[in-house]
Image (cartoon, coloured by chain):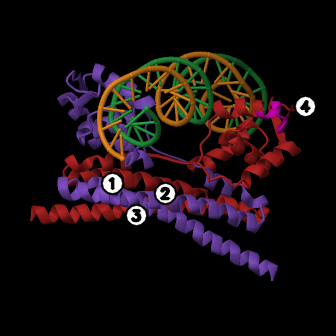
Chain colours: A purple, B red, C orange, D green
DNA sequence: CTGATCATGTAATTCGTTACATGATTCC
DNA sequence: GGAATCATGTAACGAATTACATGATCAG
């Protein structure tokens, strides 16, 4: 039985201290979401499946007013997580970017229209960069209080990544703007 | 009826001169694949659907030794493509990156193991950058012979993109390597 | 004649999102 | 009491990959 990558998101979040499906989803939404998203529709069934596989153990505490089910990693789960973290396979990588796709086919557009699409794409990446920057305090706290540096490192990569794409758009806008102006003059 | 993004890949490739499903797939594999992939399992059914919608017209020529079906854009198809290219919605963007995901959870690994994972991730992005560079002559030819500049622009973005990620890994490897050496000394 | 490439398609499966259903608790 | 949030789950759907099936043509 091979686990999907999303299973490791769950195992990883449990290792970071999340206990319920709800908490996992909450953490994902302020961290891995930007390079690996997950929805309730995946998380709850996958938790059940991981329990059947013996990688997590779930317990419903009757004393708990919220009728939540708290999970924790089993030794086997911890092992599976570590095995994945150190496995030698080239990591899966997949991008779907509608903005770049449009750009690819944009030779029939006039420069002004192309610039407009670039602006739209840049706005989106700037928005994402902002969203990430708003998370920074949380990541900094985690690094300082718990000594967990990786989430912050990855967050910083995320910000640079969004800025890289926004910056490329910006440069391209200037280039096309100059070309358009030259033609117009 | 709203079209999926992959429908626009097909419309766009037909606009660029591809005629059959096979040719579309071939072009996708040396161009958009890196930011929007498509398989036969999508292309052929989608071509049929686009024909029913009147956006493409397909013809099977009996004189053709290969029993292929040649498609072309209808005016409605050209319009749909142009409407999408100029639409004001923020472009869809989705990334699934296992390497970054691993990194996020890597606080339990020792520096040497972390560096090893970074090397793996960097190797992958360097490989992709190379793959893209091998396509460049094709894109340059298209720009010079047909005046289509967008594919080349996008290819250059693709190369810079892969190099950006490889470069980040490289920097991080050095950082962790230095930290590990300091600890070891 | 044989392997590579051209060529079209379908079926099964996997992965993931969205929407829905339900209800408790906490804060104001 | 009412809104926000906590909390768990399922069902329907959609998007995409993979594997399979089939066969023609072309280059050596």
- Distance from disc 4 to disc 1, alpha carbons, whole Å, reads 54 Å
Identity of the residue drawn at 17% across and 30% down: A75
Q: Does the magenta stretch include residue B167?
A: no
Question: Which residue carries the number 2 mark?
Answer: A128
Q: Image quadrant of residue C9?
A: top right
Task: Chain letter for mark 2, please.
Answer: A
Q: Write the residue at 77% across / 61% down.
A: A109
| Image point (21%, 28%), residue name | A76
What is the number of the mark on residue B119?
1
Where residue A47 appears, as percent x and y from the top left, is: 33, 27
Mark nearer the viewer, 4 or 3: 3
C-beta proximity under 8 Å, tags 4 and 1: no
Left or right? Give the position of A61 relative to A125: left
Asked if the residue under mark 3 is in contact with the one under mark 4, i.e. CB atoms within 8 Å, the reply is no
Earlier-in-chain disc, 4 versus 3: 4
Q: Mark 4 points at which residue?
A: B63
Helix, strand or loop for disc 4: loop
Mark 3 lies on residue: B167
């Amino acid at each position: 039985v091979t686990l999907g990558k999303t299973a490791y998101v769950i195992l990883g979040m449990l290792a970071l201290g999340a206990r319920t499906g709800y908490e996992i989803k909450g953490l994902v939404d302020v961290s891995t979401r930007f390079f690996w998203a997950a929805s309730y529709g995946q998380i709850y069934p996958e938790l059940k499946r991981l329990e059947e596989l013996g990688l997590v153990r779930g317990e419903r505490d009757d004393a708990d007013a919220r009728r939540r089910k708290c999970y924790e990693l089993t030794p086997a789960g911890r092992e599976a997580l570590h095995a994945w973290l150190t496995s030698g396979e080239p990591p899966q990588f997949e991008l779907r970017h509608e903005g770049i796709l449009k750009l690819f086919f944009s030779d029939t557009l006039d420069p002004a229209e192309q610039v407009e699409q670039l602006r739209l794409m840049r706005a989106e990446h700037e928005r994402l960069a902002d969203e990430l920057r708003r998370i920074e305090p949380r990541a900094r706290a985690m690094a300082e209080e718990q000594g967990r540096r990786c989430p912050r490192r990855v967050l910083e990569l995320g910000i640079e990544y969004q800025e890289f794409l926004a910056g490329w758009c910006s440069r391209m806008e200037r280039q096309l703007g100059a070309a358009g102006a030259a033609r117009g003059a």
